[in-house]
């Protein structure tokens, strides 16, 4: 489904290289976890897949369902089923959650050749999705993320994912900021949404999330590269040992700065 | 003033000779006085501080003619501008002239007088307040209006009277062969504990050049409430120079919302003057301009007594080569304590060629005062655009939604439903037109 090949990414116009040759393949039905120290490039990877204009691919490619998506705008990628749950969800004052979701749902539906829902049908549809992440319907009439607590913003991201039904979900530190109960609820929601036709990439710092959402593959990103991949045991090993042992590994094998 | 230096006659000075004759002595006195003042007052120019950013060429370079020689076309299909809530509380003026045929004033309940100023010239309130509330010093526009107007809107509420419906003062300007000048006039006197909502609408029916100089005087007496919505939808080539001023007495409230959409050049100078303690007033504005439009707001909020709550949110969206100017003066006089005053001017610049000048101006002589003020000029936040795009909206749609959201805040408080809806439609049309013009460029 997603195939990232020798991806080098720079900050647009500034020549600062952040990703330095990332390779990653995600197949239908899989869950991948990406871990790694602060500033290693995890969010950048997620954002470039979603099409953030701040970054520029200087080398390599991102293939999605067999085709390069580098030339596609962020909205076209969303139409094709890519979804990014932001590490820092953006506040959009004046635009209600309801407006955003109706607009998004209908454009995505149209681009996939599905029926648009009329307002009543859409209300019912939303109600089910709210239940999935146990969210208060009052949030529908509030401006997107404006004044939401940290945890509420994260839950809202997963609510949007539930509504838009993406095929590739990139969830950037969705667990950070959630309390213990919320983490379980949101994780359950993600598990329910995940099926054999879609894939999930989780970015996280904590092994705890992976107790709830069990990954098929775990990758470690350091210094803009994936330096190690393994099964779910790798997360446990990281929890015990930290990243130091891998960092030496990265410097030995990679071109150290 | 005694030594009247010779002034360069402007187009307004030249048109002064067409001032109407009046049998009525109130009007005649006012005209004589105004003519004298006008003849000793120079037309403004950009060397004067107050006019430094404003391009007056659209006025100076136009050969305006008297209305009678303008070759005006009839006003047709005007019913579509009637708001349903004011079905029986509407005054209609065409090029400044009252049209009884389109007006309807039966639905206001007891104690409310609404009509043409010319028919109420012998009333005590008219004689007391008319032209005595305007405090614009050496202002040729007020002088010209006072010299020229014959008709005008008169709204009077007796003590305790509550208008049962919003009053629509509809000012229409017709298409014409030649550019003309109109001088709409309005006087509102709201006695103790009365309550009224006024929708003042200015609409250009064609795309022609004309100049309108509306002067509006409002007196809000003790514990009275006025909700005043001013919509400017003049023709795209028009010039709109307006002077609305309100005096607020003890415990009163005056809330005004000015929406500027039309005209090539707008100069709006709203003022609120506090006359006693415990008042609450709003002077909000929304300006949506494009192309080569110039919209200038010079406002004054004059706090002269203690205990005032004042609020001014002035939002501007600039596209194309349009130019917005804002100068918001807040005065707090020496003994005016416990003032809570808020002023914010937010400008959204959608194009590279747009221009914004903003100058909040606080002059505070009291010490126990809370004044927050701010001015920002910005583009749409690219993170917000990306966020919406990542949810499937096209870039154009995302920008449209964000512009719409930006503008909407200022009209949320307009409480007449059809007007609120109309304004939403106007905002929508503006943002839509923008994103379409972007796509085709
Ligand atoms: N626009 C930018 N301009 C300059 N540097 C940037 C920009 N965006 C990201 N970076 C840098 O790139 C590096 C990777 O950032 P990124 O946000 O991808 O890290 P991360 O792995 O997600 O970290 P964290 O775990 O703290 O979220 C950081 O050093 C960051 O400062
Ligand atoms: Mg990150």
Image (spheres, rainbow, N blue to C red):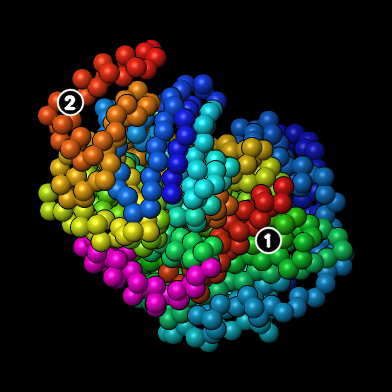
Q: Residue B315, image x and y in percent?
A: 50, 49
Q: CA distance from mark 2 to mark 1?
A: 68 Å
Query: Callout 1: residue from which chain?
Result: B
- In the depicted view, which residue is nearer to us: B411 or B251? B411
- In the depicted view, which residue is nearer to us: B115 or A93? A93
Quadrant location, the N terminus of chain B: top right
Is A129 in the magenta? yes
Q: Mark on residue B234?
A: 1
- In the depicted view, which residue is nearer to us: B433 or A201? A201
Give the residue drawn at x 26%, y 16%: A248
Give the residue drawn at x 54%, y 85%: B88
- In the depicted view, which residue is nearer to us: B402 or B329? B402
Asked if disc 1 is less than 8 Å from ligand 1, the answer is: no
Left or right, residue B320 beside residue A50: right
Query: Callout 2: residue from which chain?
Result: A
Is A161 in the magenta? no
Residue B28 lies in quadrant: bottom right
Q: Which residues are magenta?
A: A113-140
Left or right, residue A147 beside residue A68: left
Which residue was labeled with disc 2? A242
Q: Is residue B370 above or below residue A160?
A: above
Prevailing secondary structure class for the magenta stretch in the rendered image = helix
Give the residue drawn at x 35%, y 40%: B372
Q: Residue B311, image x and y in percent?
A: 39, 50
Residue A39 shows in this picture:
no
Q: Is residue B208 above or below residue B357?
A: below
Residue A246 shows in this picture:
yes
């Amino acid at each position: 489904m997603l195939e990232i090949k020798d991806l080098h990414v720079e900050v647009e116009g500034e020549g600062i290289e952040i990703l330095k040759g990332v390779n990653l393949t995600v197949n239908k039905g899989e869950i991948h976890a990406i871990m790694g120290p602060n500033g290693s490039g995890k969010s950048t990877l997620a954002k470039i897949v979603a099409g953030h204009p701040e970054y520029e691919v200087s080398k390599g490619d991102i293939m999605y369902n067999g085709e390069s998506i580098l030339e596609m705008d962020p909205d076209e990628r969303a139409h094709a089923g890519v979804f990014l749950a932001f590490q820092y969800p953006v506040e959009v004052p004046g635009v209600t959650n309801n407006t955003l979701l109706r607009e998004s749902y209908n454009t995505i539906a149209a681009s996939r050749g599905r029926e648009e829902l009329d307002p009543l049908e859409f209300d019912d549809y939303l109600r089910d999705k709210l239940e999935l992440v146990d969210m208060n319907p009052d949030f529908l009439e509030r401006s997107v993320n404006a004044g939401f607590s940290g945890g509420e913003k994260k839950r809202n991201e997963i609510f949007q994912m539930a509504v838009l039904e993406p095929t590739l979900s990139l969830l950037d530190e969705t667990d950070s900021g959630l309390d213990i109960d919320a983490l379980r609820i949101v994780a359950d929601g993600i598990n329910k949404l995940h099926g054999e036709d879609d894939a999930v990439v989780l970015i996280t710092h904590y092994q705890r999330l992976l107790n709830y959402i069990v990954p098929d593959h775990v990758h470690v990103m350091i210094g803009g590269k994936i330096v190690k991949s393994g099964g779910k045991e790798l997360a446990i090993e990281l929890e015990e040992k930290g990243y130091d042992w891998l960092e030496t590994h990265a410097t030995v094998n990679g071109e150290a700065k | 003033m005694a030594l009247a230096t010779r002034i360069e006659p402007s187009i307004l000075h030249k048109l002064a000779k067409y001032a109407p004759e009046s049998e009525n002595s109130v009007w005649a006195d006012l005209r004589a006085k105004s003519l004298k003042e006008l003849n000793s007052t120079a037309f403004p120019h950009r060397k004067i501080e107050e006019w430094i950013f404003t391009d007056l060429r659209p006025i100076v370079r136009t050969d305006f003619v008297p209305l009678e020689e303008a070759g005006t076309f009839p006003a047709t299909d005007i019913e579509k501008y009637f708001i349903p809530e004011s079905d029986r509380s509407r005054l209609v003026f065409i090029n400044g002239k009252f049209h009884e045929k389109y007006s309807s004033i039966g639905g206001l309940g007891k104690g409310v007088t609404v009509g043409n100023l010319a028919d109420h010239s012998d009333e005590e309130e008219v004689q007391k307040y008319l032209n005595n509330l305007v405090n614009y010093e050496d202002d040729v526009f007020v002088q010209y209006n006072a010299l020229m107007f014959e008709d005008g809107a008169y709204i009077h509420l007796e003590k305790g009277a509550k208008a049962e419906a919003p009053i629509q003062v509809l000012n229409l300007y017709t298409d014409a062969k030649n550019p003309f000048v109109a001088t709409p006039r309005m006087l509102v006197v709201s006695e103790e504990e009365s309550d009224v909502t006024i929708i003042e609408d200015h609409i250009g029916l064609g795309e022609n050049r004309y100049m309108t100089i509306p002067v509006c005087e409002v007196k809000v007496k003790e514990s009275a409430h006025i909700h005043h919505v001013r919509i400017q939808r003049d023709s795209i080539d028009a010039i709109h120079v307006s002077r609305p001023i309100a005096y607020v007495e003890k415990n009163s409230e005056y809330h005004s919302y000015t929406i500027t959409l039309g005209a090539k050049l707008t100069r709006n100078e709203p003022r609120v003057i506090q006359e006693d303690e415990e008042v609450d007033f709003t002077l909000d504005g929304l300006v949506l301009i494009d192309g080569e439009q110039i919209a200038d707001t010079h406002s004054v909020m004059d706090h002269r007594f203690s205990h005032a709550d004042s609020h001014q949110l002035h939002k501007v969206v600039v596209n194309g080569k349009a130019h917005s100017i804002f100068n918001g003066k807040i005065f707090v006089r020496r003994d005016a304590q416990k003032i809570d005053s808020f002023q914010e001017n937010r400008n959204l610049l959608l194009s590279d060629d747009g221009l914004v000048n903003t100058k909040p101006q606080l002059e505070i002589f009291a010490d126990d005062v809370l004044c927050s003020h701010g001015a920002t000029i910005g583009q749409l936040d690219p993170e917000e655009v990306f966020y919406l795009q990542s949810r499937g909206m096209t870039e154009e749609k995302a920008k449209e939604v964000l512009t719409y959201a930006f503008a909407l805040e200022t009209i949320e408080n307009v409480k007449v439903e059809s007007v609120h809806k109309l304004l939403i439609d106007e905002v929508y049309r503006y943002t839509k037109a923008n994103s379409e013009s972007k796509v085709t460029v």
